[in-house]
């Protein structure tokens, strides 16, 4: 015999119509209880003693109970994996044998809820709180149903508050009550409940998501992003029912980043122009940046002066959105930086395709060309498709590892671009994914090109996930394919090489990728002309020698710059550093004795080359410390700054 004991004052016959059983006759109370608890058994024996109801049930044999408990565990596993139909069958068998098994009944309710059977779920949960009026989880689920499915907020509040009287420290109950209060407009109480829930359990994903939503609607988007980033730093829940929460959290992160990037676009572009000026001074070439909506297959492109025998670097970008543009331009600027650094070490190389490499590429896919011909495609159409595909893959094999280096640098050096970078990389991921998911593309693409392209896209997806530390989960799109492990292998190669990265290594990674993908004969390298002229240029003016802090006058000039810029506005400082940057395009001689320059900002003074460069270095430190001027005055600047502070005090 199994006996359920419940104080009469705790029995909930009908939450909508509460009845105080202690206020009616004993016989009436017994009849009401028998009728209400008939779901347990057709033969329920009820007695009342000293205000406590004793509900007696016939108990099954031990072997049947043992078998039922095993079925319960199977049901739990199936429910966690999303197999709700199977779980329902297991849970129903459990409560046939053990009708008082409240966990089985509640899990059965949850499975019905996932299947969309709301009324059945409510019925089972009401049965749960009859069996055990202190079962917090049942109150939580009833509150959830009232909130999400019935929009009955006051009813939901009743269930949540009832649950909190039983266990005020249940984090899931606190979380759900917080979400309800937020929806009802009680922001302060919602925040208090969310924060309390998070202190109790820092691994529950729903609380992070709810708190991030709250910060968003209270105009604290940056805080919302921080909360979401904290979520993705936690171990992921193995329960499949948490999947929508992670998906919604990632969508929210993207929405907020895009909104912020759009609002910050002007400021970001201003910062980029500042970095452009510094890069012009470093490379000795002007940089033109222009919108070019004729770009068809790419969003932006940079053309280096030394590659095209021009006096300037050129950056062109297609207008995608205000949110993406700053990142697109910054990406191309960083490509110039990457090549310039490789040139400084005489390690830069030019990636080229020739008639010979293109012929090899086309011969390698001859079988597919023949297949397209048999299918009736016009020769001109086939030629256009094949040329675009081979050209596209050649560019992809070159750009994939380089773009990873560029994006890593942008992420590390320019946190002000994070929002634009994330929005832009997300869009690039979606476009890359088209190659994998679009059946028409797969049909027209030679299998070898398709495999290589998708593998590179998968590697890049792994890279973005690595860069944003779990905020994105782009590689998951490839998980069920063979490309997943191959893409992971390429990314791991890149990651390992980055541990001891030296400018110019990116070209070796290209070769390694190409060898793995059997694409090495598809391109050739040409030496940068700077390598060929290296020896003949050795006797040139030493004005191009690197500037380092071993020059004693650097400290004096940095201190002078700090004094000059003290109390000056950002615009005034910018005027000075921009004038020096323009001078720097033609080179600033910092070694010739007696060589001087004049500035419009200081018309009655003459400056040596190193004095000018110290002014520019300090100016950028004050104006935007993230800018890399390509000058090594860090030690001199720190000494000057310390001395300057002592003078001020």
Image (spheres, grey):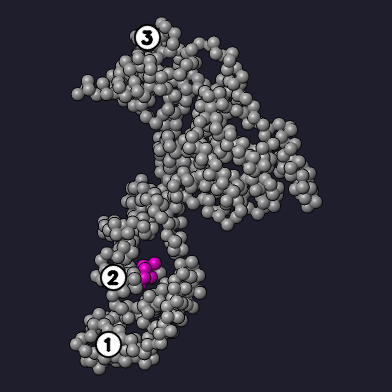
| Disc on res. 54 | 1
Query: Residue 13 location in percent, x, y?
Result: 30, 83
Q: CA distance from mark 1 to mark 2?
A: 23 Å
Observer able to see residue 114:
yes
Please name whichever residue, 594 or 262, is drawn nearer the observer in this view of the structure.
Answer: 594
Instruction: In the rendered view, tell whether residue 90 sits above or below residue 488.
Output: below
Q: Position of residue 466 (x, y in %)?
A: 47, 46
Q: Residue furthest top?
A: 594
**Which of the two labelled residues, at mark 1 and mark 2, occupies the earlier sequence position?**
1
The percent coordinates of residue 78 (x first, y second) are 48, 70
Which residue: 43% across, 13% down?
A: 590
Q: Which residue is mark 2?
A: 163
Q: Quadrant of the C terminus?
A: top left
For this orientation, the residue located farthest to the front is: 63
Label 2 vs label 3, nearer the camera: 2
Secondary structure, mark 1, is strand
Relative side of 418 to 538, left or right: left
Q: Which residues are magenta?
A: 141-148
Looking at the image, residue 546 sits to the left or right of residue 436; the answer is left
**Is residue 177 something one can see in this rendering?**
no
Identify which residue is drawn at 30% across, 69% down. Answer: 160
Q: Is residue 112 above or below residue 313?
A: below
Q: Residue at x 59, y 13 (%)?
A: 536
Q: Which residue is mark 3?
A: 606
Indicate whether residue 542 is drawn in magenta. Answer: no
Q: Main secondary structure of the magenta part?
A: helix
Q: Which mark is residue 371?
A: none
Q: Is there a contact, CB below 8 Å, between mark 2 and mark 3?
A: no
Mark 3 or mark 1, whichever is nearer to me: 1
Report the Cα–Cα distance between label 3 and label 1.
102 Å
Query: First in sequence: mark 3 or mark 1?
Result: 1
């Amino acid at each position: 015999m199994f006996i359920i004991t419940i104080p009469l004052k705790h029995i909930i016959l009908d939450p909508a119509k509460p009845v105080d059983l202690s206020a009616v006759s004993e016989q009436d109370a017994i009849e009401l209880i028998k009728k209400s608890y008939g779901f347990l058994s057709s033969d329920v024996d009820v007695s009342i003693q000293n205000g406590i109801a004793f509900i007696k049930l016939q108990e099954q044999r031990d072997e049947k109970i043992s078998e039922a408990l095993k079925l319960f565990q199977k049901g739990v596993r199936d429910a966690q994996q999303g197999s709700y139909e199977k779980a329902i069958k297991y849970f129903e068998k459990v409560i046939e044998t053990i009708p008082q098994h409240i966990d089985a009944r509640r899990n059965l309710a949850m499975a019905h809820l996932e299947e969309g059977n709301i009324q059945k779920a409510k019925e089972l949960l009401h049965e749960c709180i009859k069996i055990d009026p202190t079962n917090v989880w049942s109150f939580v689920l009833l509150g959830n149903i009232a909130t999400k499915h019935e929009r009955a907020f006051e009813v939901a509040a009743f269930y949540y508050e009832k649950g909190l009287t039983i266990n005020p420290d249940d984090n899931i109950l606190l979380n759900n009550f917080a979400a309800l209060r937020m929806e009802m407009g009680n922001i302060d109480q919602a925040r208090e409940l969310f924060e309390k829930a998070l202190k109790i359990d820092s691994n529950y994903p729903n609380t992070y998501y709810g708190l991030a939503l709250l910060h968003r609607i209270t105009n604290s988007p940056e805080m919302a992003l921080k909360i979401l980033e904290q979520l993705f730093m936690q171990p992921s829940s193995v329960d499949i029912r948490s999947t929508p929460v992670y998906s919604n959290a990632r969508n929210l992160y993207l929405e907020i980043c895009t909104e912020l990037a759009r609002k910050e676009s002007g400021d970001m572009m201003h910062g980029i122009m500042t970095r452009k000026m510094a890069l012009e001074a470093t490379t000795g070439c002007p940089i033109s940046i222009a919108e070019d909506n004729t770009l068809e297959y790419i969003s932006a492109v940079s053309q280096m002066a030394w590659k095209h025998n021009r006096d300037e670097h050129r950056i062109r970008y297609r207008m995608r959105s205000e949110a993406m543009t700053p990142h697109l331009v910054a990406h191309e600027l960083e490509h110039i930086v990457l090549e310039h650094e490789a040139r400084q070490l005489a390690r830069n190389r030019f990636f080229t395709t020739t008639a010979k490499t293109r012929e090899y590429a086309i011969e390698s896919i001859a079988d597919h060309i023949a297949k397209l011909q048999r299918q009736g495609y016009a020769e001109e159409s086939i030629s256009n498709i094949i040329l675009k595909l081979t050209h596209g893959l050649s560019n992809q094999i070159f750009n994939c590892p380089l773009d990873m280096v560029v994006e890593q640098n942008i992420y590390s050096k320019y946190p002000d671009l994070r929002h634009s970078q994330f929005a832009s990389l997300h869009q690039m991921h979606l476009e890359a994914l088209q190659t994998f998911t679009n059946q028409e593309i797969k049909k027209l693409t030679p299998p070898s090109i398709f495999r290589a392209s998708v593998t590179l896209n998968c590697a890049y997806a792994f890279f973005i996930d690595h860069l944003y530390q779990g905020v994105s989960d782009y590689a998951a799109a490839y998980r069920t394919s063979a490309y997943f492990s191959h893409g992971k292998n390429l990314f791991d190669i890149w990651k390992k090489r980055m541990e001891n990265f030296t400018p110019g290594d990116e070209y070796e990674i290209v070769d390694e990728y190409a060898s793995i993908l059997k694409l090495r004969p598809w391109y050739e390298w040409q030496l940068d002309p700077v390598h060929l002229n290296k020896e003949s240029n050795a006797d040139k003016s030493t004005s191009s020698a690197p500037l380092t802090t071993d020059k004693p006058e650097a400290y004096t000039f940095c201190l002078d710059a700090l004094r000059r810029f003290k109390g000056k506005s950002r615009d005034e400082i910018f005027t000075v550093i921009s004038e020096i940057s323009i001078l720097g395009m033609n080179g600033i001689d910092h070694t010739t004795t007696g060589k001087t320059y004049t500035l419009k900002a200081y018309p009655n003074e003459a400056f040596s080359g190193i004095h000018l460069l110290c002014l520019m270095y300090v100016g950028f430190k004050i104006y935007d410390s993230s800018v890399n001027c390509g000058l090594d005055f860090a030690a001199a600047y720190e000494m000057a700054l310390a001395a300057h502070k002592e003078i001020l005090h």
